[in-house]
Image (cartoon, rainbow, N blue to C red):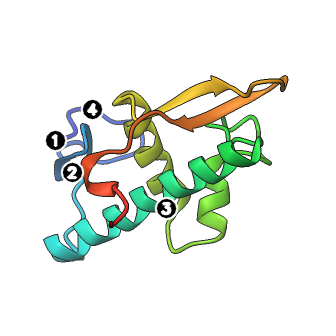
Amino acid sequence: MTLVKANHAATGNTIPLEWRDRLLVPFTSSMSTFEARARRDRLDNLIFQRVAEGWDRGHPFSSAYQAPDRYLPTIIAGRSEFKRDEVENAMRGWIASGHLILDDVPGKRRGGLRVAALPFRTRPEE
């Protein structure tokens, strides 16, 4: 992507992008393709694990930053190697693809994230 007009960046700057899990994201060349894929897989597995744990406890995580005590990206970033924006991008991609959904917890006033379907590559090993 080339910046044609920008308020806080030089015109003509180029930002390399890559298509990842149905999202266009900045290309990270600091890691090998294998390392980058392994990192994304670890993040995806962590997201699905945390969402399932929260739902099973009856205290699901939120996808809205207005709920800071339940906001999934902040919670994962605070306890892992991943940055909040990495988690946000991955979470939004999984919501957009229908793998994570927002649902109401039966018998509770608030809802949150629930795993609707595991993607093929995050299935637990048998």
Identify residue type, mark 4: Lys
Q: Which mark is residue 97?
A: none
In the image: residue 76, left or right of residue 17: right
Instruction: Evaluate if marks 2 and 4 touch, with contact meaning CB atoms under 8 Å apart.
Output: no
Pointer 3: what residue? 46
**Label 1: how many Cα within 10 Å (few below 14, some 14–19, many 20+):** few
Residue at figure coordinates x 44%, y 56% from the top left: 86
C-alpha separation, residue under disc 1 versus residue under disc 2 = 6 Å
**Can residue 62 be seen from the camera position used here?**
yes
State if disc 2 and disc 1 touch (CB < 8 Å): yes
Q: Earlier in the sequence, mark 1 or mark 3?
A: 1
Question: Of circles 3 and 4, which is in front?
Answer: 3
Residue 50 in the image, given as x and y percentages of width and height: 59, 55
Instruction: Tell me how far mark 3 sits from mark 4, CA to CA.
Output: 38 Å
State yes or no: discs 1 and 4 in contact (Cβ < 8 Å).
no
Q: Nearer the viewer, residue 92 or 6?
A: 92
Q: What residue type is labelled 1?
A: Thr
Q: Which amino acid does label 2 sit on?
A: Ile
Question: Which residue is disc 2 drawn over?
Answer: 15
Of labels 3 and 2, earlier in sequence is 2
Label 1: which residue? 2
Q: Give coordinates of residue 100: x percent, y percent.
A: 47, 35
Distance between the Cα atoms at labels 1 and 3? 34 Å
Q: What residue would you read off at disc 4?
A: 5
Under circle 2, the secondary element is loop
**Residue 58 image offset from top left, x and y in percent:** 76, 41
